[in-house]
Image (spheres, rainbow, N blue to C red):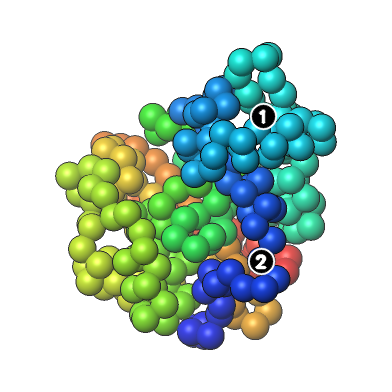
């Protein structure tokens, strides 16, 4: 199994760093489900900018059609989806993977998702739900912390321990449930286990009652580029059932998607 200690970490700003562009992205990221509409002062505070700086960026984004204002509050427009769609359209594999995931959902009668790793988070690139099993709403583009998710730990396992440790130490390791591991060494041990067995199960660490299991999607060099998972309710799908009844079908589906690469 290949590990990737030399994969680049987040680059340090240098002469080629365009600060105004970075600030524009900060403003875009300040909008979320908790703050879909914000005043100028709120945008400035959330993005760490002055009111004048935030206003210039918002007016630029408004000119480009990415935000709109009613005179007091600002919000994103549907055009902002173009930015995310550019990524998905550059990786047409996910359109081809969807039938595989749908077939898996029909077979196991549980939800299936695909995600990629972005620093210390996972980002959903495809999701085929069966019924609502989480209190939070997930869709393409949703982000979750890697340290307490099955896909996250599995994707982290493709890196050497020193890389994983740095990412974990830079994360906010919060106890989301009474089961959540927040000790870096304990999480590293789980990541190492996922590296050995090439799959990962997380039981109620992200949310009470939620259990999930993940398998890798690899390219032709063996590098893990994404993960598939199946999620269910712990009170009706135990860890044993996940491992014995669902894991073989999940691994087969992940292998089918891998062959598409």
Give the number of the disc on residue 17. Answer: 2
Q: Residue at x 41, y 77 (%)?
A: 163
Q: Residue furthest left?
A: 178
Q: Residue at x 55, y 80 (%)?
A: 7
- Relative to 249, is 216 above or below? below
Image spot of residue 213 (x, y percent): 40, 55
Comes first in the chain, label 1 or label 2? 2
Give the secondary structure at mark 1.
strand
Q: Is residue 127 left or right of residue 58?
A: left
Q: Nearer the viewer, residue 257 or 49?
A: 49
Q: Residues within 10 Å of mark 1 (few under 14, many from 20)?
A: many
Q: Is residue 14 visible?
A: yes
Give the secondary structure at mark 2.
loop
Q: Residue at x 53, y 85 (%)?
A: 6
Image spot of residue 159 (x, y percent): 46, 77
Q: Residues within 10 Å of mark 2 (few under 14, many from 20)?
A: few
Q: Quadrant of residue 37?
A: top right
Q: Nearer the viewer, residue 165 or 42?
A: 42
Q: Is residue 199 visible?
A: no
Image spot of residue 105 (x, y percent): 55, 43
Q: Is residue 137 left or right of residue 60?
A: left
Q: Residue at x 42, y 82 (%)?
A: 160
Q: Is residue 98 left or right of residue 139?
A: right
Q: Rounded to the nearest whole Å, what is the CA distance between mark 1 and mark 2? A: 25 Å
Give the number of the disc on residue 140. Answer: none
Q: Are marks 1 and 2 in contact (CB under 8 Å)?
A: no
- Relative to 235, is 221 above or below? below
Give the number of the disc on residue 76. Answer: 1
Q: Nearer the viewer, residue 230 or 34?
A: 34
Q: Nearer the viewer, mark 1 or mark 2?
A: 2
Image spot of residue 21 (x, y percent): 69, 53
- Relative to 239, is 187 above or below? below
């Amino acid at each position: 199994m290949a590990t990737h200690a030399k994969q680049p970490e987040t680059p340090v700003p240098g002469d080629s760093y365009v600060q105004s562009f970075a600030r524009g992205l900060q403003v875009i990221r300040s909008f979320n489900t908790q703050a879909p509409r914000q005043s100028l002062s709120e945008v400035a505070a959330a993005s760490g900018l002055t009111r004048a700086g935030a206003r210039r960026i918002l007016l630029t984004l408004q000119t480009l059609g990415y935000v709109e204002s009613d005179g007091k509050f600002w919000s994103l427009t549907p055009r902002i989806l173009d930015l995310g769609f550019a990524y998905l359209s550059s990786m047409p594999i996910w359109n081809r993977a969807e039938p595989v995931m749908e077939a898996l959902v029909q077979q196991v009668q549980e939800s299936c998702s695909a995600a990629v790793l972005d620093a210390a988070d996972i980002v959903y690139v495809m999701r085929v739900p069966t019924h609502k099993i989480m209190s939070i709403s997930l869709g393409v583009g949703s982000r979750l912390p890697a340290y307490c998710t099955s896909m996250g730990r599995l994707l982290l396992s493709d890196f050497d321990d020193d890389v994983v440790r740095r990412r974990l130490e830079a994360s906010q390791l919060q106890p989301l449930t009474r089961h959540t591991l927040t000790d870096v060494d304990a999480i590293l041990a789980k990541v190492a286990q996922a590296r050995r067995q090439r799959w990962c199960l997380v039981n109620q660490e992200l949310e009470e009652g939620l259990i999930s299991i993940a398998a890798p999607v690899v390219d032709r060099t063996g590098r893990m580029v994404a993960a598939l998972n199946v999620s269910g309710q712990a009170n009706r799908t135990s860890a044993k059932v996940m491992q014995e009844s669902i894991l073989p079908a999940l691994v087969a589906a992940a292998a089918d998607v891998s062959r598409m690469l």
